[in-house]
Image (cartoon, coloured by chain):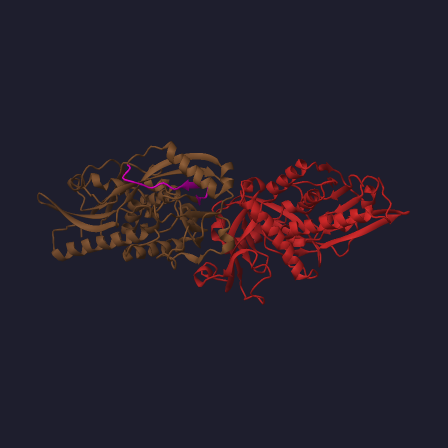
Chain colours: A red, B brown
Amino acid sequence: MAAPKVAVVGAGVIGLSTALCIAESCPSCSVTVLSDQFSPKTTSDVAAGMLIPHTYPGTPIHLQKQWFKETFTYLFAISNSAEASEAGIHLVSGWQVFKNTPKEELPFWSDIVLGFRPMSKAELQKFPQHRFGQAFTTLKCDCLPYLLWLEKRLKATGVQIYSRKVADLWELHSEYNVVVNCTGIGARQLVGDEKLFPIRGQVLKVHAPWVKNFIRDGDGLTYIYPGIHRVTLGGTREKGNWSLSPNPGTTKDIFDRCCSLEPSLRGAQDIKVKVGLRPSRQSVRLEREVLSQGGVKLPVVHNYGHGAGGFSVHRGTAKEAARLVRECIAALQGPSSRAKL
Amino acid sequence: MRVAIIGAGVIGLSTALCIHQQYHGLVPSLEMEVYADRYTPHTTSDGAAGLWQPYLSDHGNLQETLWNKETFDYLLGHLGSAAAKEMGLFLISGYNLFTQPVPDPSWKNIALGFRNLTPKELELFPGYSYGWFNTALMLECRSYLPWLTNRLTQRGVKFFHKKVESFQEMFAQGADVVINCTGVRAGELQPDPELQPGRGQIIKVLAPWVKHFIITHDTKSGIYKSPYIIPGSEFTVLGGINQHGNWSEENSAQDHKTIWENCCRLLPALQEAKIVQEWSGLRPARPRVRLERETLRHGHFQAEVIHNYGHGGFGITIHWGCAMAAARLFGSILQEKKLAGLPQPRL
């Protein structure tokens, strides 16, 4: 097959990073990104982009750790380079605080982030309602610059990006050899995956440039993540809620919870409210599938269902998806397959 | 009781506030006036980035270490208050980098979360093989000095824009106590060969992705002669110049080049940062802070001066501890006036 044609559906952080990994690892491939939403309107744009992993109950821990490590290493190198500000990647230090001591004292990612250690008594005094805490330094991926940077790199490698609503993966079978499904929450309808469900998150993005450290409550519900221009205040985890409309009562509740962790936020300006639907699943769906109709086959690689942890594992899962794409292409080129080109 | 404070940098204004807070209730009519030829944003304090961090070694000045601690604890206590933002006060974490192992500093237990850097963290800083991480405080004087001014104005303290030529000038006007917070130019009021300028130059840039301070050290050349990057609430300060004995307040192209190249080598992404301002200032350097009383006699005048100057590059770091020490000296002056039974109709 001269130039295998690969379509990546979805242009959030998963779609764009997967397309880039495919283009990087398969130079002969012709890669096209198709999506009906682009930054700043993707789910990724609502996320703060903090590299603090979410734990998937259905995925082996060693795999999650590998994905996180690959992502962290990749972004660490960018943060250390001249491209850091363009790509929107920066180091940020802070604290995860717990009202009750957590069951597991050391999360699986504690040796991947930098300088992980328990908080001192003096540090905990800043959080009178919390009894235990962890201090560490991690990376933050500001979505808007990062997705733009990914797009720029994609275009530089010849990847085409088109605005197109794909109603059914099969509709791509005549134009492409392999389809990669990075549609996030859209996969529910697109491929009928009932195991995929939204966990609605409402956040506030505010102007508070004196906030230089992150603070996160270990319960995952209240967090303060300083980005390049705005601080993300969160949040909510509403399972099964599909509403994309901001809820004013929730806004006040988030603001109050964050102010109790960081009182200076009372002076925050220009509060913008955003809502995103985390594409949640017991495990990330990262696997091959072959669709077939009337003797015609279409290999598909699924890479969706990253829930609350998309940014944390995006590069790791993108590399695995690219590997699966190469497997699909090899299978198509094998002696027993029929070349479509 | 009339008190004249000379100098309106961080030292002058905080000393004024500390004394007024402690004594205005105890002294029936405490009249306080501030005299300065430079006010914010034109003071030396305004040019400082505002990071609380003492020098690496206290050279046995345990008193200064205590004043640093008092300042840190005082500021930490204000962090959660509604005033913090207006004061320009916030927490910040960051790195101190060295080319070889060094002893822990006197302030390791004052700052929060002090620890050594891990090998992975040191990968971020090629050329540096050892370092510290800690959380400290920023106190931006372009906010803090106006805040202090507001607190003082509310208390009825008066401000005068004037270059004071001598202590006598103040006493002739009726001041009972003069507080000398004149910083690097204290020598103009009373010669002090130990006081020298430590000229600094900084470049202010827009680099909002930088969330940590990074201070490098070259133990051979001395403090602040090695590049540093300190992110503020709006701008990031790049520096690394400390020229002992240089009185020039003009920006030097050579120093600009040194700062820019060194800081960009430290953080390559700074090359994309937009330069907003350049500034030079004179740190009031002295082997130790001059914080003491002096009784001046001039004709039949006997008047008290409290000196509070010579805070080098750690004025913000030490200011409140010094202000409280100056207030204690003021208290002892009040005690003596009562005990000596000198005609003090207003006491």
- Give the x, y percent position of residue B154: 33, 45
Residue closer to the observer: A275 or B275: B275
* Residue drawn at x 61%, y 56% as measured from the top left: A53
Q: Is residue A98 left or right of residue A289?
A: left
* Residue drawn at x 76%, y 42% as measured from the top left: A7
- Give the x, y percent position of residue B163: 24, 35
Q: Is residue A56 left or right of residue B146?
A: right
- Give the x, y percent position of residue A289: 80, 52
For the magenta stretch, what is the residue range? B230-246
* Residue drawn at x 20%, y 56% as measured from the top left: B332
Query: In the rendered structure, does residue B160 fall within the stretch colored magenta?
Result: no
Residue closer to the observer: B306 or B196: B196
- Residue B156 visible at all: no
Q: Residue furthest front?
A: A335
- Give the x, y percent position of residue A37: 70, 41
Residue closer to the observer: B165 or B303: B165
Query: In the rendered structure, does residue B235 fall within the stretch colored magenta?
Result: yes
